[in-house]
């Protein structure tokens, strides 16, 4: 079982989300604890990272197998999350 760690950027985005979207994001991130490879592998500049679809939002995350951690780097709208 993996731990989920949020970056400062991801944490701020989660705080600013509406209560309904916050619940959806938290539920999706909780599922990553047991299935960390369930996201889509990213390519190009973001190779080695994963993207998790949460409605119209995306969570970009990496894995730290040594610490058994899922590190969420960013959460944001699908259109511009990959440019951050």
Image: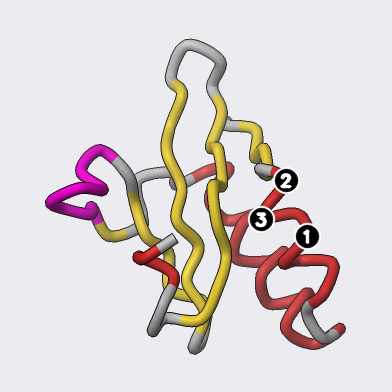
Name, please, the residue furthest toward the front: 84
Q: Is residue 42 magenta?
A: yes
Distance from Cα at disc 1 to Cα at disc 3: 5 Å
The residue located at (66%, 55%) in the rendering is 10
Where, quadrant-wise, is the N terminus in this rendering? Answer: top right
In the figure, residue 30 lies in which quadrant?
bottom right
Q: Which sits in the foreground, 2 or 22?
A: 22
Region in magenta: 41-48
Identify the residue under disc 3.
10
Percent across and percent down for residue 6 are 68, 44
Quadrant in the rendering for residue 53: bottom left
* Residue shown at the point (13%, 51%) measured from the top left: 44
Neighbour class for label 3 at 10 Å: few (<14), some, many (≥20)? some
Residue 38 lies left or right of residue 15; in this view the side is: left
- Dot 1 crowding, Cα within 10 Å, few <14, some 14–19, many 20+: few
> Decide: marks 2, 1 in contact (CB < 8 A)?
yes
The residue lying at 46 percent from left, 47 percent from top is: 61
Q: Which residue is mark 2?
A: 8
Front in this rendered view, residue 82 or 48: 82
Residue 15 in the image, given as x and y percentages of width and height: 84, 67
Report if the CB atoms under discs 2 and 3 are less than 8 Å apart: yes
The relative height of residue 81 versus residue 55 in the rendered view (above or below) is above
Residue in view at x 36 percent, y 65 percent = 83
- The CA span between labels 2 and 3 is 6 Å
Check if mark 1's residue and mark 3's residue have beta carbons within 8 Å: yes
């Amino acid at each position: 079982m993996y731990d989920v760690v949020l970056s400062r950027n991801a944490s701020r985005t989660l705080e600013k989300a509406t209560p309904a979207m916050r619940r959806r994001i938290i539920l999706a991130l909780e599922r990553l604890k047991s299935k960390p490879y369930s996201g889509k592998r990213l390519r190009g500049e973001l190779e080695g990272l994963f993207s998790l679809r949460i409605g119209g939002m995306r969570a970009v995350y990496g894995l730290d197998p040594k610490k058994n951690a899922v590190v969420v780097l960013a959460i944001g709208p699908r259109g511009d999350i990959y440019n951050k």
